[in-house]
Structure formats: C-alpha cells, structure tokens
Amino acid sequence: MDSCCGLIISCSKVPVPLRGISVEVQVKGFVADVCATLRYKNTEEKPIEAIFVFPLDQDSAVYSFEATVEGKTIVAELQEREQAHKTYDEAISQGQEAFLLEEDKSSGDIFSCSVGNLPPGQEAEVKLSFVRELPVESDGAVRFVLPTVLNPRYTPKDHDMSVTAAIPRLPADKIPYSLALNAHFQSVYGISKIESNCQLEPIQYTDGDKLSAKVSLAQGHKFDKDVELLAYYLQANTPSAMVEAGLPDAVEGSIMADPVVMLNFYPNIPETKEKANSGEFIFLMDRSGSMMDNMSSEQNAPRRIDSAKETLILLLKSLPLGCYFNIFSFGSEFSSIFSESTAYTQESMAEAVKLVNQMDADMGGTEILEPLKRIYKTAGRPAHPRQLFVFTDGEVGNTKFVIDEVRRNAHNHRCFTFGIGDGASTALIKGLARAASGTFEFITGKERMQPKVLQTLKCSLQPMVKDITLTWILPPGVEAKLLSGTPTAIFQGQKSIVYAQLKGKVEQGTEGQVSLAYSFKDEMVANVLRFTLKLTQSERPTMHRLAAKVVISNLIGGENLEEKSEEVQKQIVETSVQSGVISPLTAYVAVNKETKNPVKGPPVQRSIPLYGAPVAMACCMPMPRMMPGGPPRALACSMAAPGGYKPQIAVCHFPAPTPMPAMPLLPTPELADPTSGPAEGLSEPEIAVCYWSDSATVSDGATSAPAEGSPEPKVEVCYWPDPASVSDGATSAPAEAKAERALFQLISLQNADGSWNLNSELASVFEMSEEVLKEKIPDPVNSSPRL
C-alpha cells in the first residue's frame, strides 16, 4: 500500500522565524504590480535556515528579489538554477547569510524562499515583486487574488514527491505570523465599487472622479482562504492597446531592448440563431479524499465535493437535447456512469443526476492522468464535437504530465475546467484549459457558481472559431514580432491578450493598426484595433515583464523540462536572465558577503508552517478507498515530526475495524483530554497510535509495532459522527444561502427539455401547497401537468 498523509501538528515547542508578511498592490486597469515583504527574526540560540514554501498564481511574473539585513539591502542576482544553488550552498558553508528564491519545477504556482544562516537574535527582511494580468469575471469584475492557501499536492506512484508533502500544517488560528495588505486601484473608466471575500477597511477614493481608490485588509486574516479583491469599473470590456518603450541598457535585440505592445481584444462574435443540438459532453469529477474538505472555514460551509456536484448538475440540466454525454469519476482509480457516451434524454439525464447525488469524496488519491488517457482512447462521435469538463480542487503533484496529455489530444476536443475551493492549483486549472483551447473558472467560498457555470457552457456550445489571423499595419521600417503567438481560441465576451515586440525605428506619435480576423460558421469576421505609438518610459517595465513571462511559458509548454531540447532550455534561461523574470530553470540568489561574524556549523532548518484543513488526515499519495468496515489497521504516513518539522514517516495503528458510517473522521474538540468522552452527536472514539520511524524501515502495508527505542507513540483521539446528528444541509443558513439553495432545488427538478413537472416537489420549493401553486399559474399553463 502506498500512502502519504499529513497530520496537523503542534508547533508550540518550535519557534517560527517568519513574523509577518506585508503586501502592496498597485492595479492599473487590468494589470497588478505587487511587492511582498517577509519579515524574519531568529529567536533561537543557534543559527537557522528558514524555508518558506508558498503559492503564487501561475501567470505571475516574479521580477525582483532582495534582502535587507542590519540596514543593508542586498539585491539578488538571477542565475541559472544549478549555479544559484551552488552559490547559495557555498555561502552557507562559509558562514555567510544567503537568500534563495526559486519556482518549483513540477508546478509553476509554487515558490520556495530560503533564508540561510540567520544568526541568533537577528532580523531580516526579504522583498519579492511580481506582475500579472487580471481576468474579467462573468459579471464584469476585475479579479485580483493573492493566494495564501497551498494544499498538499497528491503524487501518484512512480512520480517525485511534491514539495507540499513536507510542509508542516497548523489550524488557521494557530498561524503565528500576520498578513497586512494595501491595494491601490486606478482605472481611466472609473471605479464603482470594490468587494472582497475577506473583511476590508472602508474603501477610500483618492480623487473626486473615482478614477483611483484604496482598500486595506482588516487585521486578523487567518490564512484559511485566498485574498480576493473584485474591482468593478464603470466600463470594463473595452479594447485597448498599450505601448511601452524598451530599456536603453538592455541587450540589443532582446525583448527588454525594443518597444513592446500589449493588445486587449474583446471579439464581437455574431450571435447564432441556430439552436445547439450536437456535441459530446464528457464530465470528469474529482472524488479524491481532499474533496471532502469544506469550501471555507465558515460555519455551515459546503464541502468541495458538494459544490462540484451542484456545478455538474447545473450543467447536466442545461445540455441541449440531441447531444451525447458521460460522467467519469476519479481518485486512486476511475469509473464512468455509462460504458460509452449516451444520448441525452429525460431518462438518461435523470439517471445521471441520481448517480451524481450519490457521489462522495471516497475514491482516495487524485490520479487524473489515467482517466484522461481512457477518455482519449475512446473514439469521438461524428458531427458531435467533444467538450471535456474537469472539476477538481487541483491537488495534483504531476501537473506537467497531466497538461501534456491534454495538449497531445487538443486536436480532437476542447477542455473546460473548474477549480473548486481555495488553494486550487492555478497551474493545473489554467494549464488544462489553455492546452485544449477552453476556458477556466475558480469557484471559492460562498461565491455564486451559476453565472460562471452558464458562461462556461455558453462557450462550449459556441461553434469553433477557425482560421485565426493577425494582420499588422505599421509605419515604414517597423515590424511586429509576435511574442504570445496567435490566439488559438476566441469566445464571445472573453478577453484575448496579444503581446508583440516592435522591431525597427519607432517614431513617436505615429499610428499603428492590427486586425484580428477569424472564420465563424463559414463567415469571415474582423476586429480592428488602432493605436498611437506613444512610447512611455517606466521605471517598472510591466509590459515587457508580462511579455517575457508569456514567452517563457510558451517555451515550456506544460511539458517536462527534462524532455526539452538543450536549445529550448537555453532560450528559457536567456529570456529569464535578460528580463529578470524567474523560470523553472533559474533562481534568485543573494549573499551577504560582509557578514561580521560568520556562522560556525550547519544551521538548523526551520520550515514555515502553513494552514492545514482541520481534518485528521490529508492524503497526498495512493491510498485505497475507505470502506464501511473502517480504516486500515496501519498506515505509513509522511508527516512533519513535532519538534523539528523534518519530514518523517509515521506508522499509524488503528483499532480493529468496527461498523461506522461513511462520513469524514473528525478530530475531538478536546484532544488534550482524551478521557473527556465524545461530544454530543458523536460516537465512541477511535484511537490511532502513531510513532515516528525512519522512512527506510517502513514497507508497504506496514503493520508492525514500534521498534524498541522508538520515540513515544503519538495518540490521536477521533470521533465518528452519529448519523442521526448529521443532516444533508445546513441547519441555520442565512437568507441569501436559503435563496441559493431554493434556486438549486428548482434547477434540480427541471426536465431535460427545460420544463417542470407540476407536483408537490415543485410546490415545496416555493413553500406552498400544490393546490396553491396551481392557482397562481395562468390558465393556459395550468391545464398541463408540466410547466
């Protein structure tokens, strides 16, 4: 048995050197420039090496890293990755303070910051800066997200362990460092309001025309959810072009030396009057153990699996008659509800909805690669374009392998993805959609999913846009070198961004024009964007850095770097170093060469703890499905050992299996007093005895007791919920949640043809009797048994 779980640990005996994080956000239109400052202090009596693994959005272009020690600022140098590690290690061995920032090779949304040889009592600050494009939501909001949740990534057998598996975890109220965030928004269109999923200080408009505004995060953020800011501009979907001058000291011919233009298209695709009645819709549902977690830490928050199921049912109810569909579930294994895609009828839809309602997060790990391969091996149906929908919390360790599989099959389908819950991997969710010309959405917290679901379905029903071309008209002697590539997919209402490098002598104030043309239902359509070549020189060449990030991402292409040719790897490193934008093949390193008292001996490693969901175990390696008979007698679990955070192996011995409901294991509210008995509504406790062991001594399915001399066993007391005390939904939801639930109930009762059966179930949604409902319906409709 392969298994790897993380337990929430107590860090009371181990000081955490990270004291606080402060973030300054500058948003201009649809681009955010962010500077994050991490404050450290070593309160121990020995030198330490602090390692902080944290999330960033996949599209973030990290362009600066510096450290400040004893009033002196050390600007880091971006080096080839192996050279940066060598520089860092040599500095540590010589007793010098050193700082390292790198992007995880397996997933572009994970970063690691190392602060090495921090002497006792000393403080240090490190700053990292990044820029990123901001998406526009279906309701017109410009969305900025600062990720603070990094969930453990599941790693299938025969793949390298994810760096997230070794991160120590704490409950939200035990995180010992703080977060402060200030955000400044500027828009030439005016700002109507700014909303957030977190508590904010009152918005402050900094000018009379409401063209700029400032908001701040209220104190006490618990790191249990990403920080999301939604800015509503008075006009958002307007095509635009921005031209930025090159840097005079940049390498000649490089991206940074020449002007760069950023084009924002909003293609106006003609409405089709034909009713869609074709298509093969395949839904891939994540039913791994992590989908059992709640969408948020708030009371009565739904589980991820329940939000995913609601999303899927909403899609099922909205499919066109005449199409074909199938639903796959995956975890450590996979299955489908039909042996092959079946015709969409009232009967097949009703059967599918019934089976979806029975689904639970009970299939172990997150092995998405094998079901994808099975889907792609199945031949599609003629005249029914295949559309793949993926629902997952994104806790996948082999991200690049999964994206590469989708990319290899992009010629015969489109892929649409839904990231469920905070911490969903942006590298996976965005990467899958982009690999197969689809769209992506993130559903978090109490966010209304209906607009996002319907927007995605509308995109999937839109006929494919073909023959996309870009035609430039520029002044004589000026040429456009496309950096982002020609768009591969265009959808109504969706922004399409193009970056280009302008080669040649650009005269200030001259005019340029670019036409985005495409074929739609055998008709040619063109969207023309005119712009002035007014070069702006900025201390922060934002457009250049975003363009460099796009170039690096395209060169990587979602594939394993080891499979890339030496020439491509060289191009990645050159683009990264010249632009200052970090890549998986480069890293930032800084060394304090003027250390007054060199550190003697190796520093003690301290991993910074992150928030961990309040569950007994979070599985991140292959694990058998939990059966009604109870948990296995023993599990080999990778976890952080108390007192040092060093990844260890724990063997957890459970009591003999006893009958229990198929419900999540809940930690007792009073772990400090296991004799206090179960709380109201909970059954007698199950006790798991865990002891620390060297990984080399643990074999698959280990069942042996602790060896003599092993550390004292760790006792965890857990209670299984009494089935009678657990209801299907929240017992006391606010009015808006109640309305949301009523809407979903109404949708779930809808027939495949869009009608409703006039019966007591429908009447109960409106909280009235069937007779009263009939009285309120107009006579021509009332005479029919269906609405």
Image (tube, rainbow, N blue to C red):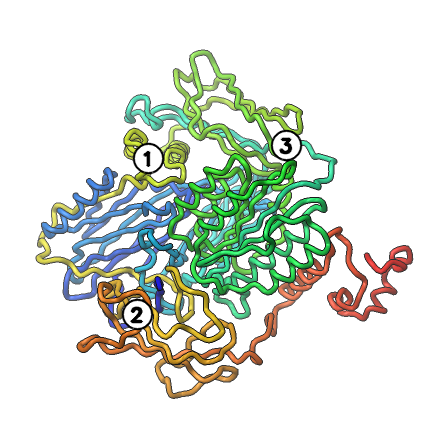
* Residue 507 horizontal side relative to residue 468, left or right: left
Res. 564 mark = 1
Vertical placement of 499 versus 583: above or below?
A: above
Q: Position of residue 314 (x, y in %)?
A: 64, 54
How many callouts does the rendering have?
A: 3
> In what element is the residue under mark 1?
loop
Name the residue type under label 1: Lys
Circle 2 residue: 702
Residue at x-position 23% and y-position 54%: 124
Tell me which numbered mark, 1 or 2, is placed earlier along the sequence: 1
Tell me which numbered mark, 2 or 3, is placed earlier along the sequence: 3
For label 1, count other residues whose C-alpha is less than 10 Å away and answer few (under 14), some (14-19) or many (20+): some
Labels 1, 3: front one: 1
Q: Nearer the viewer, residue 355 or 302?
A: 355
Residue at x-position 37% and y-position 33%: 555
Name the residue type under label 3: Asn
Residue at x-position 61% and y-position 46%: 281
Res. 268 mark = 3
Q: Nearer the viewer, residue 787 or 227?
A: 787
